[in-house]
Image (cartoon, rainbow, N blue to C red):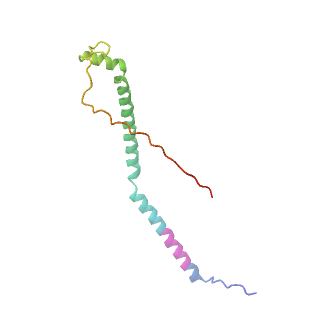
Amino acid sequence: MILPRFDLSTATWRARAIRYVVIYLLLALALVMARYLTQDVRPELRAAQKREATLTTQRDELELRVQALGNPQRISDWALQNGMRRFAEASKTSAPITGIPAPKPLQPHTTLEVTTEWK
């Protein structure tokens, strides 16, 4: 049985160390660049959250106002103030409905005969 021979020379270890240091430096540089490029994301996110909270509050207030203005009693009061009358109090007139063509005559019913043959 032959054991594999490992290269344990100083030059090999130095090359590995340099390679690992370069890899770590590149990773660190990538992280620093990513942080630099996204540094204004957090403040913009906070500003968007504040705008969302403001808009949500405004929406809730407007919904309450619409509900208050849409109250049936308030609508009735507004209608009476603007000269409208209740249906029960309004004068009613009737007239025949004209201008509607007569319906087409019905087609006579036809029967359908089905013949089934069993084999």
Is 58 contained in the magenta span?
A: no
What residue is rendered at 43% in x and 60% in y? Answer: 34
Residue appearing at x 38%, y 25% in the figure: 67
44 or 14: nearer the eye? 44
Q: Quadrant of the C terminus?
A: bottom right
Q: Report the side of 88 relative to 110 (left or right).
A: left
Query: Residue placed farthest to the right in the image?
Result: 1
Image check: 115 left or right of 94?
A: right
Residue 100: x percent and y percent? 27, 31
Question: From the viewer's perspective, is 22 left or right of 87?
Answer: right
The residue positioned 65% from the left and 83% from the top of the image is 6
Q: Give the dominant element type of the magenta stretch: helix, strand or loop.
A: helix
Relative to 21, residue 87 above or below: above
Q: Return the residue nearer the eye: 46 or 29.
A: 46
Looking at this view, name the residue that lies furthest to the top: 89
Range of magenta residues: 15-25
Residue 81 image-quadrant placement:
top left
In this orientation, which residue lies closer to the viewer: 69 or 97? 97
| Above or below 104: residue 94 | above
**At which x and y percent is residue 79?**
28, 18
Q: Residue 73: x, y in percent?
A: 35, 17
Work out which residue is located at the far bottom of the displayed protein and give it: 2
Q: Residue at x 35, y 26 (%)?
A: 65
